[in-house]
Image (spheres, helix red, strand yellow):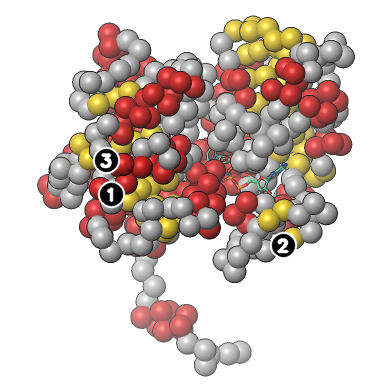
Amino acid sequence: MSKVKNISLSAAGEKELSWARENMPILSGIRERFEKEKPLKGVRISVALHLEKKTGILLETLQAGGAEIAASSCNPLTTDDSVAAALSKKMEIFAWSGQSKEEYYGCLNAVLEQKPQIVIDDGCDLINLLHGKRQELLPQIIGACEETTTGVIRLKAMQSAGKLKFPVMSVNDAYSKHLFDNRYGTGQSTLDAIMRITNKLIAGKTAVVLGYGWCGRGIASRLRGMGASVIVCEIGSRLGESGIGTEDGACKPASAQQKRESGCHRALEALYDGFRVMGIDEAASLGDIFITATGNKNAIDVSHIEKMKNGAIVCNAGHFNNEIDIEGITKKGARKEVLKENLECFTLKNGKCIYLLSEGRLVNLARPSGQGHPIEIMDGSFAVQALSAEYLVKNKGKLKAGVISVPCGIDDEVARLALFSQGIILPKPTKEQIEYSTAWEHGT
Ligand SMILES: NC(=O)c1ccc[n+]([C@@H]2O[C@H](COP(=O)([O-])OP(=O)(O)OC[C@H]3O[C@@H](n4cnc5c(N)ncnc54)[C@H](O)[C@@H]3O)[C@@H](O)[C@H]2O)c1
């Protein structure tokens, strides 16, 4: 039995879904095929994704393929209540915006009641629950798909500790996901949300972007496009899946498969892209707007917040709400005043007021100001999700427990379909070109 905020919002939600459906040609092509072939017939799929209109079209696509869906959000603030109401007429939905932590976990547990065979997660909370309090559900799991960088980092840590019990497709690592979703999607939607909440001008401001990964690159380039003077802050060490950060900042590789790029490479890239680059200690007093996109804890800590200008705006585009140390400033006596939805002023002991957007949660997704990524971007990302779910079912029992890559076939096909949907068809290489590109004999 679904649980949403207000079922009478369903007509408005259906209009939102129609608009998304019309603008998601890749998923609509997949849906047509799924309707005919029913590759997910009778498969129970539990989902934890930001529950808004684009996600709704993914859920409809999976359902068209024959799946039984139970879905919740992967964040307490990001559900579009009208869309949740509309979807709850077609499938099981447990989601509303503005949840407490207990309600959030209550909804994750509720979707697991359907005893899933496939799990679609964003941030790994659902998968984590299955490996903790809900282990009794592990035997029937065929596999899972993970949407975001932070989730993949957690999964890789689980795998290294020998704890991951089923195959998980790293949808985030597909090129047709992170190249476009994390960069152009987060770039546009983060600025959109900041402008909706504050109604302030970006041009002429000094904006500090923490993290020059896929998301940070997108945010920095869009800020520059809007006329901000941008400072990029990175970290001088490898972290998480890319290696182990050491106290002296030296690099200690975690494994043979570690990523090649460190924070220093990314900082250098930012510099060559034309941005000012420095540590947050130095940037803290310079910025008018701060945006974190690091996937890391306390990227902005108490000492940085204390150095900021009176009236500085701070927000987060990374997955969890721990990138800015709100708890720390609260413990140090900062007084919070809610000015309006998604806008709070923290008055520090030193008398300065620092504005925090969306409680430090994903600013581009926190409702109602956060609309999420543009529709075309999610069309590609969710096409990877739908095809990955189909792949897991087709390969049931053949895949080992662990983090697995999305096959190139799926990745290439989604990019091809995205181009096709924009009327672009590229030529195939000639026989001669294929031969040339695989031969070593040809020289000057
Ligand atoms: N807002 C959204 O819609 C959205 C979309 C996709 C991903 N994400 C989330 O955004 C975060 C970043 O994702 P990504 O794909 O860009 O990751 P990424 O791994 O490509 O980049 C993160 C960067 O942050 C740097 N970093 C780490 N700690 C830092 C610190 N303390 N100070 C400064 N820099 C630091 C790392 O060196 C790295 O270059 C993740 O939490 C991810 O899940 C959000």
Q: Please, is residue 354 above or below residue 31 in the view? A: above
Q: Which amino acid does label 1 sit on?
A: Pro
Q: Earlier in the sequence, mark 1 or mark 2?
A: 1
Residue 116 is tagged as 3
Quadrant of the rendered image holding ligand 1 = top right
Residues at marks 3 and 2, CA–CA distance in whole angstroms: 39 Å
**Residue occupied by mark 2:** 252
Q: Position of residue 168 (x, y in %)?
A: 39, 52
- Circle 3: residue type: Pro
Residue 63: quadrant of the picture: top left
Identify residue for label 1.
139
The residue sitting at the left extreme is: 36
Residue 168 shows up from this direction: yes
Image point (85%, 25%), residue name: 307
Residue 17: quadrant of the picture = top left
Question: Which mark is first along the chain, 2 or 3?
Answer: 3
The residue at 38%/47% (across/down) is 145
User: Secondary structure beneath disc 1?
Assistant: helix
